[in-house]
């Protein structure tokens, strides 16, 4: 764990948080992959697992500085700052590009995931039967999840809490897309679109001195849903980090092989050439979310035709691979300094 960080380190840590936040919001992409490739995955997991009984005792006793140092607060604080900012800025930009340049965005992500597979697996020197089995099982689970049919929306608070626990897995488990899991659970729009927009609108109203939202039952319901979802996410984040910290210490090679399998399996979700299937009602009309956008139900994948658009997409795939290799180069360079 790094105790001292330069201004440049702090700046890039916020940028990495922005990238994790944006990746977590895109179905099929895992923020954990960003952490893995950018070289701070293990510090992220080890910092989270220090949110434990001792940390709470330090907090309750008023020893805030000790608590901050114990949980590696500067690292987690800057990273989460980037993630929060991302949800209200970078992810909005990403939504625009997904709407207008979907093929090229998915191609870029596809290339980045291919690069991530290379990055994680290149240092494996001791392949054995257990690791191969772990790789196959991880891949099979990832592929199986990719082709499941989504459920319907459910705002039951116990279920929302469960969604929070499951969705945050994308941050701690590379290749396991939390946002895609939310689509399968039927609550992607409710938890990552409607409730986030409700929070944004509420913050704007408070700054403007407008408190009429207190009488808005629909807004209050969404804020309650977001609060429970956040609580579930924090619970899942801390719980998963303790589990992963243990298995990384005792079964690192098998864990990394399984993670590589998850990432390979997730290639089916981010396959660039696919037709979006939207939810429709009994009359065949598109069902819209609170922002007026069609709600995605799933994707129908196909093989591309050889044309100019396909060749441009392939260039974006290569660019995605180069971005990952560039991050690897930067990580190795900073380690030597």
Image (cartoon, rainbow, N blue to C red):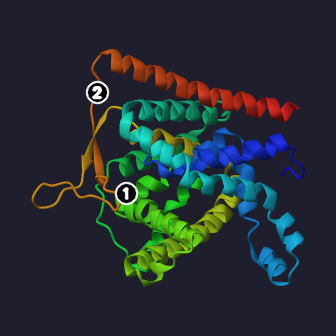
Residue marked by disc 2: 303
In the figure, is residue 202 to the left or right of 303?
A: right
Q: Residue at x 55, y 54 (%)?
A: 87
Quarter of the image that includes the C terminus: top right
Q: How many marks?
A: 2
Estimate the x, y position of residue 310 in percent, counting from the top left: 35, 20
- Judge whether 155 appears above or below 337 on screen: below
**Residue 4 drawn above or below residue 222:** above
276 w.r.t. 118: above or below: below
Residues at marks 1 and 2, CA–CA distance in whole angstroms: 24 Å
Residue 146 location in percent, x, y?
37, 47
Q: Which mark is residue 7?
A: none
What residue is rendered at 56% in x and 30% in y? Answer: 115
Q: Is residue 223 visible?
A: yes
Q: Which residue is mark 1?
A: 183
Mark closer to the observer (1, 2): 1
Taking the image as drawn, is residue 30 in sight? Answer: no
**For this rendering, which residue is in front, 208 or 326?**
208
Residue at 61% of width from left, 34% of height from top? 121
């Amino acid at each position: 764990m790094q105790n001292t960080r330069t201004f440049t380190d702090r700046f890039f840590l916020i940028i990495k948080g922005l990238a994790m936040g944006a990746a977590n919001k895109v179905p099929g992409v895992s923020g954990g992959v960003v952490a893995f490739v950018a070289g701070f995955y293990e510090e992220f997991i080890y910092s989270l697992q220090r949110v434990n009984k001792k940390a709470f005792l330090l907090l309750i006793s008023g020893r805030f500085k000790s608590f901050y140092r114990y949980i590696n607060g500067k690292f987690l604080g800057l990273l989460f700052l980037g993630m929060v900012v991302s949800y209200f800025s970078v992810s909005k930009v990403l939504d625009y590009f997904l709407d207008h340049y979907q093929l090229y965005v998915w191609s870029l992500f596809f290339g980045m995931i291919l690069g991530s597979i290379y990055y994680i697996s290149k240092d494996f020197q001791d392949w054995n039967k257990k690791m191969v089995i772990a790789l196959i099982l991880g891949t099979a689970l990832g592929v199986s999840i990719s082709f499941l049919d989504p459920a319907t929306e459910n705002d039951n608070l116990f279920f929302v809490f469960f969604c929070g626990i499951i969705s945050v897995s994308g941050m701690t488990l590379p290749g396991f897309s939390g946002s895609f899991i939310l689509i399968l659970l039927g609550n992607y729009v409710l938890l990552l679109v409607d409730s986030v927009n409700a929070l944004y609108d509420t913050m704007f109203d408070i700054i403007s001195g407008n408190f009429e939202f207190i009488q808005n039952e629909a807004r209050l319901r969404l804020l309650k849903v977001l609060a429970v979802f956040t609580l579930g996410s924090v619970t899942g984040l801390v719980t998963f980090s303790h589990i992963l910290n243990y298995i990384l210490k005792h079964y690192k090679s098998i864990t990394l092989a399984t993670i590589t399998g998850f990432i390979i399996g997730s290639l089916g979700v981010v396959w660039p050439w696919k037709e979006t299937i939207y939810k429709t009602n009994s009359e065949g009309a598109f069902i819209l979310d609170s922002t007026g956008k069609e709600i995605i139900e799933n994707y129908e994948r196909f093989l591309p035709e050889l044309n100019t658009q396909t060749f441009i997409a392939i260039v974006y795939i290569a660019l995605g691979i180069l971005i990952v290799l560039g991050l690897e180069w930067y990580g190795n360079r900073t380690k030597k300094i």
